Image (cartoon, grey):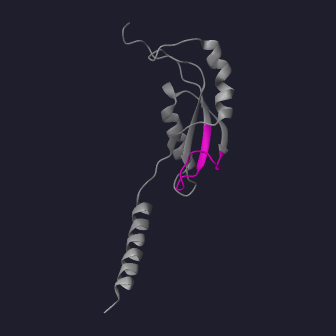
């Protein structure tokens, strides 16, 4: 009969293996994270010139979109598609920067890419 310490060691090994299998089976999509200061500074002149807008007003000004991703878990197409989905009215995206050190991303998706999104044309008003 195995000692209690040996049984606990076996159980821990099995749980670790189970956790790895579960983690690799999950799909992890790129997720939005706070943009770098340089991106905010880049779009600041546009925001200052625009003035005040209400929360539901159309905003044509460029804005940064930052996403965390992993080269092992995500494809470039998946990252760009996610960024496009966050840019209003299918506006054009422009690559801005990429980093992987102290960026707010987790261990499984350590890379952050930042795009500058210019919102597409204003949609027609539903009240007209």
Residue extending farthest top: 128
Q: In the rendered view of the protein, which quadrant contains the C terminus?
A: top left
Q: Which residue is pictured at 54% across the width and 55% down the height? A: 107
24, 38: nearer the viewer: 38
Q: Which residue is pictured at 43% across the width and 61% down the height? A: 23
Q: Position of residue 59 (x, y in %)?
A: 53, 18
| Left or right of residue 11, residue 28 in this image | right
Q: Which residue is pictured at 61% across the width and 38% down the height? A: 114
For residue 50, above or below residue 115? above
Which corner quadrant of the image does residue 21 belong to? bottom left
Q: Position of residue 4 (x, y in %)?
A: 34, 84
Residue extending farthest front: 4
Residue 112 is one of the magenta-drawn residues: yes
Residue 35 is one of the magenta-drawn residues: no
Q: State which region is magenta.
A: 99-114
For residue 127, above or below residue 46? above
Which corner quadrant of the image does residue 62 belong to? top right
Q: Which residue is pictured at 44% across the width and 66% down the height? A: 20
For the stretch drawn in magenta, the main secondary structure is loop
44, 89: nearer the viewer: 44
* Total residue callouts: 0
Q: Position of residue 47 (x, y in %)?
A: 62, 18
Which corner quadrant of the image does residue 14 belong to? bottom left
Residue extending farthest left: 1
Q: In the rendered view of the protein, which quadrant contains the N terminus?
A: bottom left
């Amino acid at each position: 009969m195995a000692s209690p310490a040996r049984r606990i060691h076996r159980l821990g090994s099995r749980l670790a293996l189970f956790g790895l299998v579960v983690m690799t089976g999950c799909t992890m999509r790129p997720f939005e994270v706070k943009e770098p200061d340089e991106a905010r500074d880049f779009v600041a002149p546009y925001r200052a010139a625009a003035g005040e807008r209400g929360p539901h007003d159309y905003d044509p000004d460029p804005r940064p979109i930052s996403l965390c991703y992993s080269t092992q878990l995500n494809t470039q197409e998946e990252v760009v598609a996610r960024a496009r989905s966050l840019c209003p009215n299918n506006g054009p995206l422009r690559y801005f920067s990429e980093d992987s050190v102290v960026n707010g991303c987790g261990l499984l998706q350590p890379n952050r890419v930042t795009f500058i999104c210019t919102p597409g044309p204003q949609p027609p008003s539903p009240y007209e």
